[in-house]
Image (tube, rainbow, N blue to C red):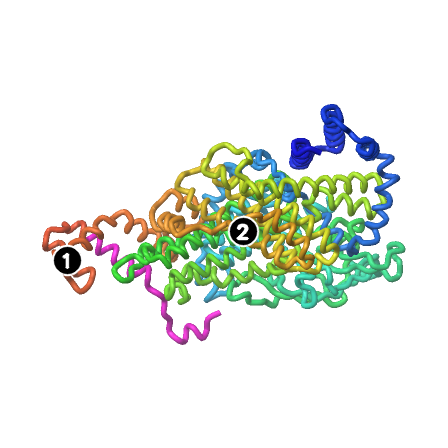
Amino acid sequence: MSPLWLVLLIALIWGLAYKRASLPVWTVAVIAYLFFYMQFVPLITHVFVITASIFVLVILGLNIPVLRRNLISRYILKLYRRVMPKMSATEQQALAAGQVSWEGELFAGMPNWKKLADIPAPQLSREEQAFLDGPVEEVCAMVDDWDVTHKHADLSPQVWQYLKNQGFFALIIPKKFGGKAFSAYAHSQILIKLASRSVTLSSTVAVPNSLGPAELLLHYGTQAQKDHYLPRLANGEDVPCFALTGPQAGSDASAIPDIGVVCHGEHDGERVLGIKLNFNKRYITLAPVATVIGLAFKMQDPDGLLGNKKDIGITCALLPRSTPGITIGRRHMPLNIVFQNGPIQGKDVFIPLDYIIGGKDMAGQGWRMLVECLSAGRAISLPATATAGGKVAAFSAGAYARVREQFNSPIGRFEGIMEALARIGGHAYMTNAARRLTLSIVDQGVQPSVLSAILKYHSTQWARLMANDAMDIHAGKGICLGPNNYLGRGYQSVPIAITVEGANILTRSLIIFGQGSIRCHPHILPALQAAHGSDVKAFDNAIFGHIGFSISNFARSLWLSLTAGRLVPFAKSPTQRYYQQLTRYSANFALLADMCMLVLGASLKWRERMSARLGDVLSHLYIASAVLKHFEDQGSPADDQALVDWSCQYLNHAIEQAMAGILRNLPQRFAATVLRCCIFPYGARARAANDRTEKRIAGLLTQMSAARQRLTQGIYTTYQDNNALAKLDELFKKITAYEGLTRTVKAAVRHGEISGDTWLEKVANAVKENILNQQEADILRDIERMRDGVIAVDDFDSAELTSSG
């Protein structure tokens, strides 16, 4: 074959693979190539003709589904069933739970960016905005977090009653039952403002509106259960909790040892068929004050009273607090964040079968119910709290770095502080962007199980980083607890968010990629389902689709890596290059994920660090796309470009480092070498943001900029005497408004026109030398008085501390 025809053949194959052409298109293209080759190339040998004819017959045969299934697919299916990983019933339910949205495009390696652009930006309705401006503001004004956490270890009775009266526990309940029926975005915005005032307050409101009785009733409850409980939950007559975790079942919640045995017993004076429960739960939020308890347990029917099945499985039921045999009321103290949380025990607690959520027919369906509900709830509550923490960190650290001076200069001008400020700004921007995109998807009716895990993990991890940086910037001001400390309780709360609703180590190591590889991959779940059901037709479609998918991923990954994605067509814009890079990384990830699953097989399930790195790539692809969408949803403001640059460069660098880590640790070294050449032909070259970008972000946070306003929007900053954050803001605004006066005095000192041992002496001397007038001097004195108040830390009588909660 001449070089020209060889090049044409390679180009044809590469083009078909890159565009993911269907098998019929491949067939027509290859036959056409052979036809023209034989027409224009002289001296065709008989061997070539025979070989080409056989090849054409084979490829034509592959286009006949019945022939392909009987000669190929049914034998592959037999082999596949022998080697496929074993999955428990709970694993199958978890994998089947939830739905796929934008993350599926990223996993497929060929993202359709128009689909991302078409997801509507989240918006509040007039009713939702009015609730934020009215009751949410009002309850924030009612709460003094120091009083709550230090003196009373609880919200005041007035606040509890206000929350009930105003429907704070009914945000997700439909209006026909007396609820608010708010969007997921509104729910999140409410929690952000509450959390910025008090994490105890936001946690108290979050739990009834997240994974709990109301959510389970809405999706699975009988009509009688909905009619009875939902109005009572909406008006606060009932306070709910949900008991899942116990001493022996934390992250492995499916291993709960709590047992419910089907038997006959007494209920309301009658002998009925029901369940005798024995359970021991802990870490149950709202348990000490709950009037109705959602309970997860393993249901057993040893006597066959319901049928032939002895082990029915995990089941969820609703129990009134007054049910005999329940011990409830004691409290845990989660790092001095005093939301109501405690243990629940039950000894020989008998309930009728109609206490099962959804009735008898939903017995054994509890794990599926919980996982499906968690898919949406986990995307709202904890990410909202983390977002609030990031917004407060950016708001306070930026202001404090401007008002706090050392060495005769605001500390925000020191490069070490700039570096920390940039990290806060970048992480806050990424967290909010990912939150908004995920909420838009939830509000479209999707239950995004993989996305909720991504968002929960990264938002709470970044909340810890932002809290650390904010604490470092505030230094002594941050570490002394008291009424004037607006960081301390939020700092203490971070490990709680990291621990609950799926501990972060577990979420990263097992869930994000473990669930994502099956739920988001276009062919794996269909193949598994077909194999479980011995469906040759469905398996044939899945396995040949997967073969074509893998070939395409190889071609796309190599081409996009060789060209660094620069030839991917995108409209000219400040973010064009980031879209090109993400398109490349998506193809790299699709290839790498496929090869890891092929090479490692079922062992990938236990290679948690490999799974974690693959999950990191998927997560960062999603968050980077969320950053770009958030930027465009806001009109691509030029002020935010530094935040976008920092975020995308941070994420691109993290993506490359995660992929490089996978390649370093892949045990099959030949496969790793081939993949490295395909993914990193020039090496891992992405770099994190440079000093210039970080200086720009620090400048945004330490000035009254529109970017700062957008980044920190939604937190509680209304001025009142016990709102230290608002006092900081007032001083910050005044300093930035009159910074010209400060510069005038400092310039006079520098030029030897005035002197003085203290700032106030210098201001007084500036008046004497007619550098300032009296009014200007009064402004600077007032600023200094306010500064003294803001940077002050609290102190206490020893007796007060020994009696603190």
Question: According to the image, label 1 marks what residue?
Answer: 764
Give the percent coordinates (x, y) of residue 517: 68, 49
Task: Report the residue that reaches farthest toward the top.
Answer: 39
Q: Secondary structure at mark 1?
A: helix
Give the percent coordinates (x, y) of residue 339: 54, 61
Task: Report the residue that reaches farthest toward the front.
Answer: 43
- Does residue 226 appear in the picture of this structure? no
Q: What's the residue type where badge 2 is placed? A: Ala
* Residue 789 located within the stretch drawn in magenta: yes
Q: Residues within 10 Å of mark 1 (few under 14, many from 20)?
A: many
Q: CA distance from mark 2 to mark 1?
A: 59 Å
Residue 570 left/right relative to 85:
left
Disc 2, disc 1: CB below 8 Å?
no
Task: Report the residue that reaches farthest toward the left.
Answer: 769
Mark positioned earlier in the residue sequence (2 or 1):
2
Image quadrant occupied by the N terminus: top right
Q: Which range is magenta?
A: 778-805
* Residue drawn where x is 51% and y is 44% of the image: 627
Q: What's the residue type where badge 1 is placed? A: Ala
* Residue 299 located within the stretch drawn in magenta: no
> What label sits on residue 670 in the rendered view?
none
Q: Nearer the viewer, residue 83 or 300?
A: 83
* Residue drawn where x is 37% and y is 64% of the image: 477
Q: Secondary structure at mark 2?
A: loop
Question: According to the image, label 2 marks what residue?
Answer: 684
Q: Residues within 10 Å of mark 2 (few under 14, many from 20)?
A: some
Give the percent coordinates (x, y) of residue 29: 72, 29
Q: Nearer the viewer, residue 695 or 343?
A: 695
Give the percent coordinates (x, y) of residue 273: 83, 57
* Residue drawn where x is 89% and y is 61% of the image: 303
Magenta stretch: dominant secondary structure? helix
